Image (cartoon, helix red, strand yellow):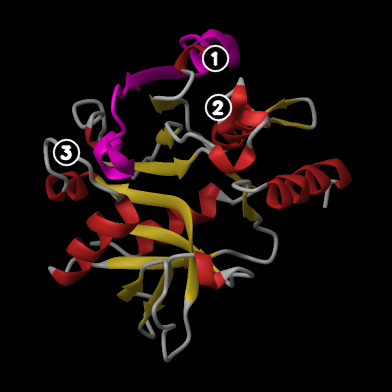
Amino acid sequence: MSTSQAVIMCAGLGTRLRPITDKVPKVMVPIEGKPLLLHQIEHLKEHGVNDFYINLHYLPEVIKDYFGDGSKFGVKITYSYEPELLGTAGGLKKFEKYLRDSFFVVYGDVFNEINYSDMRAYYEKKQPAIGVHVIAKNDHPHDSDLAVLDKDMRFTAIYRKPHKEMPKTDYFGMEGIYLFNKKILKYIPDSGVCAIDHDLLPDIISKGEKYYGYLAGVDDYVHDIGTHERYSKAQERKKSGN
């Protein structure tokens, strides 16, 4: 099974990173001299991904002017512009006609050094599965979506933020990195706003689909840059090489 496609969600407004994001989308903020989105693409390319799909909303020309069709970076990029935000699942649905059997989905504002090859191998071992989802211990659980899994790492429940109560058992933070089977797309409505974590995943779990957590390894690094503090930590990580 080959997974050479990735959808990178890039439509966010980045309001918590203002004034940095007054003139550039959040995915274009610099880390060690180049945009976060370029780090994402280069890392996925190292793991055999060369076909990219990017949704746009806020300052779309900044992204398109920099990346073009992707050829200067040795990849192919297809865009989808959303005049009104469709949510992460709604944005994903727009690429349905292009997507093959399986594909990665990554939130563009999550700086990561995930071993995508290992994630792909894990997904293949879990077949038949509708997908796998990177999970990790989380240092800010109160503002994160949380997953509860069974002994086989299969999702049994999702606790959505904001939390009125925390899970009574062990839980994991849900990172914005997925590997989906194309059949998941049938659960996304053709129109309207739909979010992956808040709408799509609870639906597939309630309907008995096999969806598994992929526990980030000791050498994996996943860090969203949604706040100035987290952005600074990602910059320090890349600068130090640790």
User: In percent of the image, x 24 and y 39: which residue is there?
Assistant: 90
Magenta region? 63-92
Residue 227, percent from left and from top: 64, 48
- Measured in 3D between alpha carbons, the distance from the residue under mark 1 to the one under mark 2, in whole angstroms, is 7 Å
Disc 2 crowd rating (10 Å Cα; few below 14, some 14-19, many 20+) is: many
Q: Give how far across and how far down residue 205 sits, in percent.
A: 22, 68
Which residue does the image show at 88% across and 47% down from the upper left? 240
Near mark 1 (Cα within 10 A), the count class, few <14, some 14-19 or many ≥20, is: few
Q: CA distance from mark 2 to mark 3?
A: 23 Å
Judging by the rendered image, the residue that carries numbered circle 1 is 62
In the displayed structure, 181 sits above or below 66; it is below
Residue 191, x across and y down, in percent: 13, 35
- Secondary element at image label 2: loop
* Residue that sits furthest to the bottom in the current view: 168
In this figure, which residue is indicated by the disc labeled 3? Answer: 192
Give the residue at mark 2: 25
Do residues under tags 1 and 2 come within 8 Å of each other at their CB atoms? yes
Which element type, helix, strand or loop, lies under badge 1? helix
**Element type at marker 3?**
loop
Q: Which mark is residue 126?
A: none
As for residue 115 lying within the magenta part, the answer is: no
Q: Nearer the viewer, residue 183 or 237?
A: 237
User: Is the N terminus in the top left, top right, bottom left or bottom right quadrant?
Assistant: top left
Report the side of 148 relative to 94 (left or right). Answer: right
